Image (cartoon, rainbow, N blue to C red):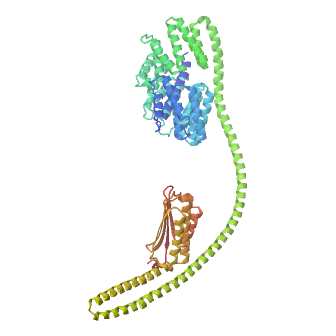
Amino acid sequence: MKNKYYIPLLLLFLLFLFFACIKKNEGGILVNSSQDSLSTYFSLANDFSLAREKRQAFTRKAFDIVVNQENDSLNRINIFKVANRYYNINDWKDFNKTVHLVLDKSENAKDTINIIKAYTYLGDYYVSQSVSDSAFLFYYKAEKMYVKLGDNFNVGKTLINKATLQYMAGDFLGSEKAVFIVLRIIKNEKQANNILYDAYNLLGIIYSELGEDENAITYHNKALLISDDEIIPKEFQSRATSYNNIGFLYLNTQNYLLAKRYFQKGLEQKKLAIQKPSIYAMLLDNLAYAKFKLKETDGLPQLFYQSLKLRDSLKLNSGIFINKIHLSEYFFSKKNRVKAFQYSKEALLLARNTKNSRDILVALKQLAIIEPEKASFYTKEYIRINESLQKEERKMGDKFSRIEYETDQIKDENTDLETKNRNLLFGFSAFAVLGLFIYILKAQKTKNRELLFKQEQQKVNEEIYNLMISQQSTIETSRVQEKKRVAQELHDGVLGRMFGVRMNLDGLNKFNDEPAIKQRISYLSELKNIEQDIREISHDLNREKSELINNFVAIVDNLLEDQKKTFKPKLLATIDRTIKWELISNSVKINLYRIIQESLQNINKYAEANSIKIEIKKRDGDLFLTITDDGKGFDVKKSKKGIGLQNIQSRTTECNGTVDIQSKNGNGTIITIAVPFENKQILT
C-alpha cells in the first residue's frame, strides 16, 4: 500500500524543492536600488524565521513598489523576485498573477530570456495545481526556445521538469528515457552538477517504482556523492534530500532500522529547519513512521504532530495528507479507532478537495481497514477510481505526445504563414523599390539641373569677386601712389624748406644779446618738432600702404564687423598680418572667405554659442584657419551628410587642403582648415 503512494508524492515534494531552490538562487542576487525599502522587503520576505503571514505581507509591499515602475531589465528582475517569494510561501494565486505580469512586460520589451523564464514559472504553477498537461505545455515551449538559443544547460533543466511530469503521469519508461536524454545533453556542460543531481534523484525514484531496488540505490548514492558540490548552494540542503530519499527507499523495502538511520542523518544537517522547512517536516514524519514500524514508542506521536503543524503552516497539502494517514495508522495500531477514523476521514476530504486521485485511493484503502464492516463500499469506490486513474494516466502519456505534436504543428503552420507573409512582403517591397528607383532617377535629374545651375552661379560669383578684387586693387594702387607722392612731397619739399629756415635762423647766432638767443632757441625747437611730426606722417602713410595692399583682409574684416553688429555671440578674430595675401590665388581666398561665412551661418543658426574665435595664421609652411565656438556642439558622425559640412569639405578639397572637425554634444565645435602652398615664400 505504501509504495504506490509515497514515491509520486515524494517526487512532487522534490519538484517543489528543486524549483524553490532555483528561484531563491536566481532572486538571491540583490540589485542596487535607490529604494532601500524594496531591498528590505525582499530580505524579510525570504526570512524563514518569520511567520508565513508576515512574509506574505512583505512580499505584497515589494509588489506594490515594482508593479508600476518603468519596464526595464531591473524592473523585470525585481518582479521575478516577487514571484519567487510568493512561490516560497506557496501563495499560488499571487504567484500566478505576478508571473503573468512579468510575462506581459517581457513580451512588450521583446526580452526573449525572460519570456522563457516566465514560461518555466508558469509550468511550476500548474505543477502546484496538479494540472499536468498545462505544466507540460509551458515546459515544452521553454524547451523549444532554449534549443533555438543553443542553451543546453537550460534545455537540460526543462527536460528534467518534463521527465518529472511523465513520472507523475505513470509513464515511468518514458520518464527514464527523458532523463538519459538530459544526461547526454549536459555531458559536456560545465557547472551542471545541480541538473545532474536532480537527474540521479529522479532515476532513483523511477527505479524504485519499477521494483529495481539495486539501480535505485545506485543512483541515489550517485546523487548523494555530488550533493556537496560547490556549484549546488548549501541552502538547497541537497544532502538532507538525498538522505531522505535513501531512507525512504529502505522504508519501502521494510528495512526500517536502516531507514531510520538515514532519516536521522538528514535531520542532523545544519540550518535545515530554516532553509528547507518542507524537507525538515518530511524527515520528521518519515522518522516517526520508521520508529512506529520498529515499535519504538519514544517521541510518538509527538513527531507526527510536529511535522503536521509545520506542514500546515506551510500549506503543504500533500504533506498534510501523508501525516494524517500516518496518524490514522498509528492510532489504529493503538486500538483508538475513533482517532484513526477521524484522521482517515480528514485525509479523504483533503484528497477530494485537491482532486488527487492517488491520495483518494490511499485514504479509501485505510478506511476499509479501519471500518471492515464498510470494506465492500470502500473497495467498490477504490476499484472505480483506480480504473479511472489508470485510464487517465494512459491518456496523460498520450496527451503529452499530442501536446508536442500539436505545438509543433502550430509552429509549422505559423512558419508557413510567415513564409507566405514574407513572400508577400518581398513582392510589395520589390514594387516599392522599383517605384523608389524611378522617383530617385527623376529626383536625380532635377538635382543635376540644380547642381549645374549652382555651378554656373558659382562661376559668376567668382568672376564678380575676381572683378571686385581687381577693381579694388586698382583703386588701392592709385591710393598708394597718391599717398607716396604726398609723402615724398612732405619729405623732400616741406622738410627741405624747413631745413633752409633753420639754417637761416642759425645766422642769428651772430647776435649774442639775450633776447635774440632766446628767440633763436625757441624757433629752432619748434622747427625740430615740425620736422619730427612730418617724419611721423610720412612713416604712417607708408605703413598704411602696406596694410591696404591686401584687400582680402579688409573684406574678411567687413564680414566679421557685420557678424558683430548683427548677432549676439562675442567674436574675437586674429589674422596674421605678415602673410602676403596678394601672392595667394583668388580661388583660395574665395574658398577661405566662403568657409568662414558658412561656419558663421551654422553657428548663428544652430550652435547657441556665447563666443566665437576665428584665427588665420601660418605654421610649418602651411596656412591654418581655425574657427572655434562654445555652443552646444553636435555628433560629427551623424552630421557628416549635412549640406554645411559638405560645403566646407568641398571647398577645402578645392584648395588641396585638409579639414578637421571636432565636436561633441554640449562641448562646442572646433573646425581647423590646413592649406598647403608650393610657393613657401608666400608665408615668409
Question: Exactly how many numbered labels are in the figure?
Answer: 0
**Residue 432 x, y percent position in the rendering:** 71, 55
- The quarter of the rendered structure image containing the C terminus is bottom left
Q: Residue at x 55, y 39 (%)?
A: 70
The one nearer the camera, 385 or 129, is 129
Residue 351, position as x, y percentages in the image? 59, 17
Residue 482 in the image: above or below residue 558 = below
Is residue 494 shown to the viewer in this render? yes
Relative to 670, residue 46 above or below = above
Measuring from the top left, give residue 203's x and y in whole percent: 52, 28
**Quadrant assignment, res 124:** top right
Instruction: Using residue 442 as the reference point, say whether residue 683 is left or right of it.
Output: left
Q: Position of residue 256 (x, y in %)?
A: 46, 16
User: Quadrant location of the N terminus?
Assistant: top right
Residue positioned 58% across, 26% down in the render: 93
| Placement of 258 over or under 122, stated as above or below | above
Rendered image quadrant of residue 443 = bottom right
Residue closest to the eye, 523 or 611: 523
Asked whether the viewer can see residue 200, the reply is: no
Q: Nearer the viewer, residue 527 or 127?
A: 527
Q: Which residue is drawn at 50% across and 8% down?
A: 331
